[in-house]
Image (tube, rainbow, N blue to C red):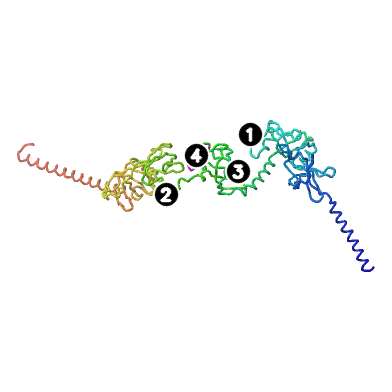
Amino acid sequence: MSETEERQVNEVEGSEENFAELLNKSNPKPRKYSEGQKIKAKVVRITDEWIFVDLGGKSEGIIARNEFDSVNGGLTIAEGGEIEAQFLYLQDGEIILTTKVGGFRASRRQIEEAFRGHIPVEGLVVCEVKGGLEVKVAGIRSFCPFSHMELRRGADLSKYVNKRLLFHIIEYREGGRNIILSRRAIIKEEQEKKIAHLKDELLVGKEITAKVLSVQNFGAFIDLGGVDGLIPVSEMTWGRVEDPSDVVKVGDQVQAKITSIDWEKQHISLSLKDCQVDPWVTIEERYQEESWLEGVIVRLTGFGAFVELEPGVDGLIHISNLNAEQHVKHPKDVVEVGQKVNVRILKIDKESRRISLSMESERVNPFKNEDLGIKEGELLQGEVESVKPYGVFVKLPNGLVGLVPNEEMGTQKGSKHKQMFKSGAPMDVEVLTIDRENEKVRLSRKAVISTKEKQNVQDFRAYSDEKKGEEELGSLGIILKARLEEKFGKKL
């Protein structure tokens, strides 16, 4: 065979191959879809009954037109638009798709296909029945339990009556005479889509305006457009909140700042007070040390009483500054919650957000006086103020408090001083040292005991000497009497 003939044969064979390829391309085999498979497609043609979509190549799928009917009589889709549908079944070579079963006159077979393919069905909520809601799907009576209507339980479900909603069929028995529905998966899927969008919209530190959904004793839930956010009661105002409903109510539009986000747990916390002026920013403009003002007792503790000066600003009266005239064991002995009091500002610590207060007039520090009213070596009677592991504090007659260390108590080692010396009990002490620089007085009970013992010995010796003198004087009198009787010759 010549080169020309060989080339002609190859061209013919090549043409046959190319023709076969073109034929296969022009008549592709229909794709295989599984029941319920999701398909994204473009609308290519709309007729009176059907919507035709392009499935790639020469393949087309059809969807019932009335699935896209709008409430005003038009269509919610147009040619060229994209839709997401699900494969329903293959009929006479036609690929039947749906966005929802029940949106047209579905047969029991189509309802069953939706069950097997996990395809959403549209149902009309008819009424409430025991345990749930009665729903009609393409005229077929079905049932949705209360627990499958929403992700959260406890909501009022009567609001769904006479509304058309999408459901999944979770049970299909007795040829369609027993159909159980659920909305939970559909709601969850919708919520996940919303959350995916909200992740770009909601950021920590962003201020948003939202509607109050519910008010609880711990805070308020607000609608963030797909997820709920919580405003804790502590973040509602700078002041003290007894009842959150005094601050916000259901339906209110509030402005709040996002403080934390946990997408995994779907917990979003917000703050109302962060959108308000912090009263501590200008605290020094409104309050000065040594000034007097009125406040309200809001809380009592073992160490003092908290006073609200204004919403968001509290001060502390230490127990030692409640009453100068008497020893205060607990603030409740002097003040009570809700009581209005006049207080003096001792110190303002803006950085730590603390204000120290006093109910007393300014004290004169006795250590600054030249005469303390006591001196070293003096014996005094004081009053037990408190017993500590290292010693006993005693209040002296001049108002100062001194410490009797354990080694100066004059008791046996290991003695339980708390049981032996009660608060308010009298105690005789000797002033050992006065430290003006550190404003401390050191006392001793042991020294008083020792001094008393010495005095007792001295008193006893004096008494003994007196008795001895009396005895000696008595003997001398007897001798003198005898001599006189002898001299005068008669009894005296």
Say which amino acid is labelled 4. Val
Chain-order first, disc 1 or disc 4: 1
Instruction: Tell me, yes or no, whether the two marked residues, 4 and 3, touch with CB atoms within 8 Å.
Output: no
Q: Which residue is mark 1?
A: 156
The alpha-carbon separation of the residues under discs 2 and 1 comes to 51 Å
Chain-order first, disc 4 or disc 2: 4
The magenta-colored residue range is 238-244
Q: Which residue is mark 3?
A: 224
The alpha-carbon separation of the residues under discs 1 and 4 comes to 29 Å
Chain-order first, disc 2 or disc 3: 3
Q: Which residue is mark 4?
A: 241
Q: Quadrant of the N terminus?
A: bottom right
The alpha-carbon separation of the residues under discs 4 and 2 comes to 24 Å
**Is label 1 in a helix, a strand or a loop?**
loop
Say which amino acid is labelled 2. Asp
Q: Which residue is mark 2?
A: 349
Q: Quadrant of the C terminus?
A: top left
The alpha-carbon separation of the residues under discs 2 and 3 comes to 38 Å
